[in-house]
Amino acid sequence: MPDTTDVVIAGGSVAGCALAVLLGRQGVRVTVLEKSPKPEHYKVVCTHFIQAGATPVLRRLGIAETMERAGAVRNGLEVFTPGGGWYVMPDDEHGYSLRREKLDPMLRELAARTPDVQVRQGVTVTDLVRDDAGRPAGLRGRTAAGDAVAVDARVIVGADGRGSTIAALAGVPGRVLPHNRFGYMAYYADLELEAGGTRAPMWLVGRDVFYCFPNDDGLTVAAVFLHKDRLPEFKRDKEAAFVAAFDGLDRGPDLRSATRVSPLIGKLDVPNVRRPAARPGVAFVGDAAQASDPVWGVGVGFALQSAEWLADELAGAFCAGVDPDPALERYRRTHRRRLALHHLQMADFATGRELNPLERTMHRAAARDPRTAKVMAKVAARSEPLERALRPRDVARAAVVAMAR
């Protein structure tokens, strides 16, 4: 006989575990099905830069202090563009940088000890079942040993990444927008950055993007996102090409004098994918709902934010004993209102183009005007809809500042 619960979540990483914790604390019964059997499992390809918009969720989960004890860095950005020079984004709000090998197990352990939450690892989801009316009603799967797993629930959640199995089984396709850059990253020890401290330098040069993100344990993530025209040089010798890519950057790091402590990690294709965040009986969080350009370090932040929005809508419905589908529809609208324009803006830049006139104006003005720098920090934090973070009057002020001699 199938197990029964209120919500079954496929995926026990950041989004899935955060959602489970927030639901369980509000009295909703949750089962998490995680494919990996290892409690220490984590996502390898990640910038580890958690934008400031997610900090309130981390505090609500109660793990911000735990993260800091584990070495998490309160991050900030210093941005360079050839036409504008350097500017520092004000750190009135901050995010965190912490390697996923620490963050993911931390969240999974938190979910496992939350009342009303059951975390089942080593379960691969194979099917989604529907009730007589055709509404999603449960998941089926198998363990590595071949044992059948059956969980019925009133709401199914896909927290299983950009290639979501739940989305495919539920028939909810995503809109795919191409990404014309490829990325490589590596961890370095003893990498000296001119910015100093925990501030992360980021270079937007032509069609290419470079950054160095200080992380826990004194490590720094160095990463490049380059137009695919440059892929042949990496295919010839990716190790040499990666180091050489940083040569000539203004105040650029000297990777040759630092110690690389990880393999060179590459991702050649990272398409932008967005799908409706909910349908009757089913919802999506994190990359399963929206996988945006990783250049901007938004993946973990969006995972945490979307988990909070969905948890609060569903908890209200379950606690009131009413149909959860209207709550799912409210979540869908919230997700679209808060993140859709951010996604489209990032996907447009992911075509591999250079900064457009508006972007050049904003960066140039930010280097001269603290108020514009604060606006750019709000945009980067992704804590509010794009049209509220970047208002017409802010653009008008930036245009005046940028044109002033």
Image: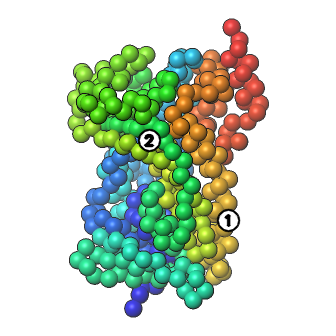
Which quadrant is home to the C terminus? top right
Q: Earlier in the sequence, mark 1 or mark 2?
A: 2
Residue lying at the far bottom of the rendered structure: 1
Question: Residue, x 46% and y 56% (percent of image)?
Answer: 162
Seen from the viewer's position, the closer of residues 358 and 11 is 358
Labelled disc at residue 36: none
Q: Could you tell me the amino acid type at mark 1? A: Arg
Q: Is residue 79 visible?
A: yes
Question: Residue, x 57% and y 55% (percent of image)?
Answer: 175
Which residue is label 1 attached to? Answer: 330
From this view, report whether residue 153 is shown above or below residue 79: below
Residue 328 in picture, x, y percent from top left: 63, 69
Q: Residues within 10 Å of mark 2 (few under 14, many from 20)?
A: many
From this view, report whether residue 330 is shown above or below residue 150: above
From this view, report whether residue 334 is shown above or below residue 238: below
Disc 1 to disc 2, how far (Cα)? 29 Å
Residue 222 in picture, x, y percent from top left: 35, 32
Labelled disc at residue 49: 2
Question: Residue, x 70% and y 17% (percent of image)?
Answer: 401
From this view, report whether residue 229 is shown above or below residue 7: above
Q: Could you tell me the amino acid type at mark 2? A: Phe
Q: Is residue 55 visible?
A: no
Instruction: Judge from the rendering whether residue 161 lies leftward or rightward of residue 100; answer left or right.
Output: right
Seen from the viewer's position, the closer of residues 67 and 301 is 301
Residue 250 in picture, x, y percent from top left: 43, 16
CB atoms of marks 1 and 2 within 8 Å: no
Residue 22 in picture, x, y percent from top left: 51, 65
Q: Residues within 10 Å of mark 1 (few under 14, many from 20)?
A: some
What kind of element bears circle 1?
helix
Instruction: Give residue 224's quadrant in the image.
Output: top left
Seen from the viewer's position, the closer of residues 326 and 17 is 326
Instruction: Give residue 39's quadrant in the image.
Output: bottom left
